[in-house]
Image (tube, rainbow, N blue to C red):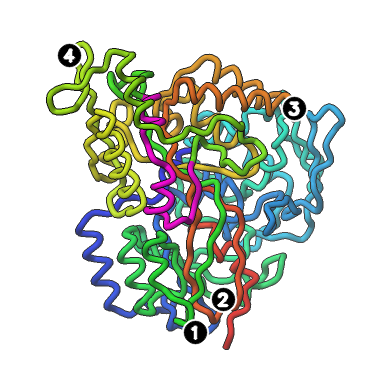
Amino acid sequence: MTARSIRGAVAVTLATVLSLTAAACSQPGGPDGSGSGSGTDSAVVGIAYEPDSLSPLLGYGKDGNSKIFDGLLALDGNMGLKPALATALPEVSDDGLTYTYRLRSGVKFSDGKPFGAKDVVFTYRTILDEKTNNASRTELDAVKSVEASGDDTVVFTLKYPYAPFAQRTVLPIAPEHVAGRQDVNTGAFTTHPVGTGPYLLTKWSKGEKLSFRANPDYWGGAPKVKKFTMAIIKDDDVRATRLRSGELDGAILPPNLAKGFARGSGMRTYAATTYDYRTVTLPTHNKVAGDTAIRRALDVAVDRRAMVDSILNGEGRPAYGPVPTDSEWFTKGTERTHDLAAAKKILDAAGWKPGKDGIRTKDGVRAAFPLWYLTGDKLRQDHALAYASDAKKAGIDITTEAGTWEVIEPRMKQDAVLAGGGSPADPDFDQYTLLKSSLAGDGFNNMAWYDNKAVDQALEAGRRSGDKAARKAAYDTVQRELVKNPGYTFLTHIDHLYVVKDRFGALTTQVEPHDHGLASGPWWNVEDWTPKK
């Protein structure tokens, strides 16, 4: 779980909600194509959050599909790898330690300068530099070196045969001649990017919108949607209101709001299967949440199926860990059945005895702790309230609190958080940053400060082995250890719902990560859309 995948939607204050509501009464159109009324070759979609930076050197677009940039490879509609800035998939040595990429010729950055091997080398070396503030650096831990062989070939040498390395090369490539001449962490490139992608950023109004125009010289062909705008609307209700009023051409919505857009309304609803989960962090440093018996009791006290049915309207699945139950990497037998009686027995045996008010105590410590969720995020709020209700029945008093990440982040070491995460492709992508003890306190990595030596060893084994059976055994160990001592209570894997105007025709979705709306959704391939006149 990376900083960006955990952060999800940024919270919104009441003042922001009011300003967005006021904005909904005005016309968003303008010369930058920021409104749906600006022409048939434009599109405006509502998303729930904005990135911290637009620099791939700091993590933007690391899972591909950034619109402004391209990676060496890209993911197609079936999540298969396909060439992008490379001419083909990499040539891999027999020992799995060398990956060679041949680069596409004639590609230019949006400032007209040519793309070449030096830009690939610069990008990867800069991300791996400890001075670069990239919270996802450990995802490239396997890289020993990256070298250019002429202008059109790049060779990666790995420390160990990291099986999913090719999937890591969807990461966007930055221009050395721009980003290499300024401070990587604070320079203008972080907000005024130059890339090779199908769109060029025309304006980023923080907290309001990201505006793009089609790159007429894009190597893959100029997009037919000439102006594309992502309206940043952090409150779910406000986003639905603006879609209904006609200000937006599409939006991501929680299930209870998406169902309000019926068929025949000129809108279509799209459901995307995801790896996106909602989980409660149980901080190791909290005397209650860090207690193994409390953790195990909560794991069976929670009614996951009821959450799927009532909160998600059936658009999702129960979650027992970061790996979805329908994944080939899921460990059968680690499902936890809702069993309130079993939860009470676990607590009784561990010495957590009910008080007069029904709340348990042990050695003078009351079984109580706060649970934070993001303001404006109805899904997180509903999950938090349901979780607290289930916990209360077992004698654990959880107080739900809403706040922004600025309020929540300093409290994460001690307080529980209703968090989100999830990444397709490979189990290493989720589990390493989520559970590795050495990453505790590193931004939004290992938010629960989980510390389990058996899990640490299994994570390293899964990451370093090139043998799929050995890797499966390692991740089986991780999932079984999470049953014994769950540092998180995983609740649901949610399907993402999007509502989009019919005028764009029948669209498609991919299997999506936690980060959604920004680079995912039906607009994952907006450069291929053909709007109806």
Location of residue 331 with respect to 206 vertically, above or below: above
Does label 4 or label 2 sit earlier along the sequence?
2
Closer to the camera in the image, 267 or 29: 267
- Residue 309 in the magenta stretch? The answer is yes
Indicate which disc, 3 or 4, sits on the residue closer to the N terminus: 4
Task: Say which amino acid is labelled 3.
Answer: Ala
Mark 1 and mark 2 in contact (Cβ < 8 Å)?
Answer: yes
Kindly identify which numbered label has been placed on residue 226: 2
Dot 2 lies on which element?
Answer: loop
Q: Nearer the viewer, mark 2 or mark 3?
A: 3
From the viewer's side, name the closer residue of 529 and 416.
416
Residue to which mark 4 is pinned? 364
Q: Position of residue 517 (x, y in %)?
A: 48, 59
Question: Badge 2: how crowded within 10 Å, few (<14), some, or many (20+)?
Answer: some
* Stretch of the chain drawn in magenta: 295-318
Label 1: which secondary element: loop
Say few, some or many: other residues with alpha carbon within 10 Å of mark 4 (under 14 / 14 to 19 / 20 or more).
Answer: few
Q: Real-space Cα distance between discs 2 and 1?
A: 9 Å
Amino acid type of the residue tagged 1 in the rendering = Gly
Q: Quadrant of residue 35?
A: bottom left
